[in-house]
Image (spheres, grey):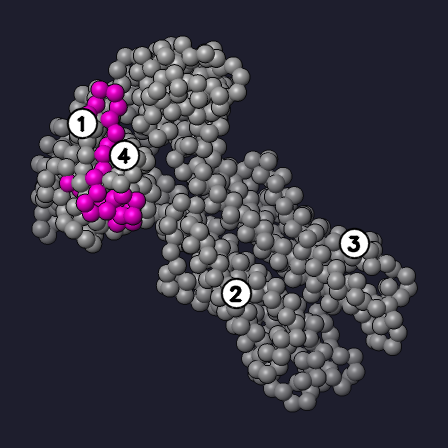
Amino acid sequence: MNLALTELRRRPGRFTVATIVLTFLSLLLLLLGGLLDGLFLGSTGAIRAQRVDVIVYSDTARDSFLRSRITPDVRESVEATDGVQEVGGLGFTLLGATVPDETDLADVAVAGYEIAPSGVPDPPPAGHAWADERLQDAGVSIGDTLLVGPARSPVVVDGWVEDTNYLLQGALWVTLDTWREVQNANRPDAFVGDGVVQVLAVRGDGDAGALAAAIDDATGVTSTLTRDDAVFALPGVKEQKSTFNAIIWSTLAVVLAVVGLFFSLLTLERTGLYGVLKAIGASTRRLFAGVVLQAVVVAVIAFVVGGVLAFLADLALPGQVPLQLTTGRYVFTFVALVVAAVLGSAISLRRVTRIDPASAIGSAA
Amino acid sequence: MFLAVTEMKRAKVRFGLLSGAVGLLVFLIMFQQALSTGLIDQFIGALKNQSADVLVFNEQARKNLEGSIVLPDQQAAVGEVDGVAVAAPLGEGTFTVLTGGSDEETDAVIFGYQLGGPGAPTTLVEGRLPEATGEAVASSRNADEGFDIGDTITVLANAGGEAATFTVVGLAEEINYSVSPVLFTDFAGFEAAKRAVNPDATDVLPSVIAVQVADGADAGEVAAAITAAVDGTEALTRQQAVDGSPGVSSVRQSFSVILLLFYLVVPLVTGLFFLIVTFQKAGALTLLRAIGSPAGVLVRALLIQVVVVVLTGSVIAVGLFWLAAQGGGGGLAISVEPGPVLFTTVLVLVLALATSLAAVRRVLRIDPIAATTGAGVQVG
C-alpha cells in the first residue's frame, strides 16, 4: 500500500499524462452534465415549482402550455370532479422586455398564477411581478419597471424568486389578469377571453394518476398529466436528456478504457518488480490494491483539477450558454470517475495474478 | 514495417484497448458534430431555405420568430424603405394537426406567405408550390408521417373555432423548424389556422415581414436601412436571421467547447500510449540501433502503428456512428455523411501523429553505444 503511494510521490512524472487525460475527461463530463442540468433546470423551473398534483391541458394542445386553452365552463367541471381540492389557473407568455438603462432586451416568461408555486409569494398587485433571479443577469433590479413585448406593457418588479424559469426565459410571476392584459396586448393572434387560462394546476386527494383520469373523464375535453409528466412534456426536454446521457455514458466508457490501458502498461513495466515482491512475500491482493489505489488517486486529482476548470469555464462562458453546475452533478461525476478508475485498473488484475514469484530468481528484474 | 505489425499482433489487448478508446472518442466527436449540425438544420431549416432576402422582426422579439409580430403601420413603413422591392407578410405558428391517414395528433409548424412573393420555400424536390388557399408544401423529411403529396392535414380547432385543412401539393427538403414537420401555405391559410385555435383572436398579424430587395441592392444594407427607418423593428438578412435564432448560437458555442476538448483528448491518449510503449521498448530499440537499424526505420515503424491504431479506431467509430444513426439521435434524424467522417478521421490522425512526435524524439535520442555498456538504456 505504502509502496504505491510512495511511487506516486517520488515519480509523479510517470502519472502526469494519464492525469491530464483524465482531467480533460472529467472536465468534459462536468461540462456535458452542466449543460444538461442547465437546459433541464432552466426550462422546467416554472413547472417543477408547482405545488400541485396534476396539470390540466385542453385535449387539442398536445400537452403544450402555449397552445392550451381552458374556458371557465371546463374549469367548473374540473372543480366539481371528485377528489379535486384546489384549482388554480396558469398562463405563460414568452416575450422580450426592455430593462431600464439597459440596451439589450431581457427574455421573459410572463406567468399568470393563482396557487403560489414553491418559493413564490401570493400573487402581487396588478401590474407588479415576482421576478426570477435569472433576470438579474439581464440588469433587472427590484423596483424596475420592465416594458414587456411589442406593446411595451409595464410590469414592476417587486422581489426575487429562485429556480422558476420557463423554457430558458426568466419568469415574471403576475396575477392572471395582468397576464391576460400582457398576452392580449402583445399577442392579439392568441387572445384570451375573461376567465380563460392556458392550463389548470390542480391539487387533490389520493393518487395523482387516478386524479388525472377522473378529471379527463369528467370534462371530456381535457388531457391531464401528473406534474412530473408535465415537466417531461415540455418541448425537447426528454430528447435532450436521453441524448446527453448517452454522450455522458460513452465518455465514461472512454475513461474506463484510458485507465485500463494506462495501468496495464504500468503493470507490464513492473512485472519484474512484482516478481521480486511476490518472492519476498507480498500477496497478489496487496500488489493489486496498490494498483487500484494509484488509479483512484489519479482519478481524484483529475476530478479536482477538472472541477476547478469547469467552475472557471462556467464563469468565463457567456450567460446565454445554459451551463449550470450543481452539487449533485459534481458528486455523480466524482463517483463515476472513481468507479471507472477502479474497473479500469482491474484489467491489470489478470497480469498481476499471473506473475510467478519464481521468476524473480535468475532474472535481472 | 514487419516489426511494427508483429508487435501489434503479439500485444492484442493493449492495442485493442487503445483502438477501442480512440474509436469511442472519434465516435463521440462524429456523433456530436452530426447532432449539432442536425439540430441547427432542423431548428432553422425553414428560415434558411425560404426566398426572402431580408426578414423584418419586431425588435422586442429578440430574433425569435415565435415571439415576433409586426404591426400594420410597421409593415407599411417597411415597404417605403429604399431598396425594398416587395414587402410581404410571413406568419409562423405551431399547431396541433391530424395528418392524412391517421387519427394520431401531431405538431406541425405552419408558415404563411404571400403566394408569388418572398418567403416561399426554395428547395422544392417534388410537386409544386401552393397556388391557392388550402394548398401547402410540406417538409420532405416528414413525407412518411402523413405529410406526403395528396395528404390532407387538419388543424384541430379549439372550442368555438373552425378547423382549417390543407392539402399537400409539394415537398421541399431541409425546411423543418423547431424539429417539427413544416407546412408552407398562403397567408390566408395561416390566418385560418390561427383563428381555428384562437377563435377570440382580434387580429392575425404577420410574425415577420419578408422582403425581396431591389435588383442590385445589397441585402445587408437594406436590412440596416429598414432597422434605422422603421421604429421598433429589427431587420436581418436571411443568414443573420439563421445565425441569430434563439438557441442556435448557444448550441454552437456549447458544442464547440465540448468538441474542442474531445479533439484534445484523442491525441493525448494516443501520444501517451506510444510514449510509454517506447519507454518500455527502449532496450530493444537500442539493440536494434546497435546492430545497424537506421533511426528512420524505427520511427517509421512507430508512425505505422499510430496510423493503424487511428484508422482501426475510426472504423470502430463509423460502425458505432452508423448504429447510432439507425437508432435515431434522441428524436433527431442524424445521418452518416462521408465528408464530416473523413474530415474528423484525418484531423484526428494528424493530431495523433503530432503528439506521437514525443515518442519519435525519444527514439531518435537513443544512442546505439549504450548497448555496449551492458546497462541497456537510460529510461526517462
Q: Which quadrant of the rendered structure holds the N terminus of chain B?
A: bottom right
The residue tagged 2 is B313
Q: Residue at x 17, y 30 (%)?
A: B191
Q: Which residues are magenta?
A: B135-162
Q: Amino acid at mark 3?
A: Ala
Closest to the observer, B124 or A42 = B124
Whole-angstrom CA distance, mark 1 to mark 2, is 56 Å
Q: Residue furthest right?
A: A280
Mark positioned earlier in the residue sequence (1 or 2): 1
Task: Check if residue B161 falls in the magenta segment.
Answer: yes
Q: Amino acid at mark 1?
A: Val
Q: Chain of mark 4?
A: B
Residue B306 point in image, percent of width and height: 55, 71
Point out which mark residue B204 bears.
1
Q: SS of the residue at dot 1?
A: loop
Whole-angstrom CA distance, mark 3 to mark 2, is 31 Å
The residue tagged 4 is B97
Residue B90 point in image, percent of width and height: 18, 37
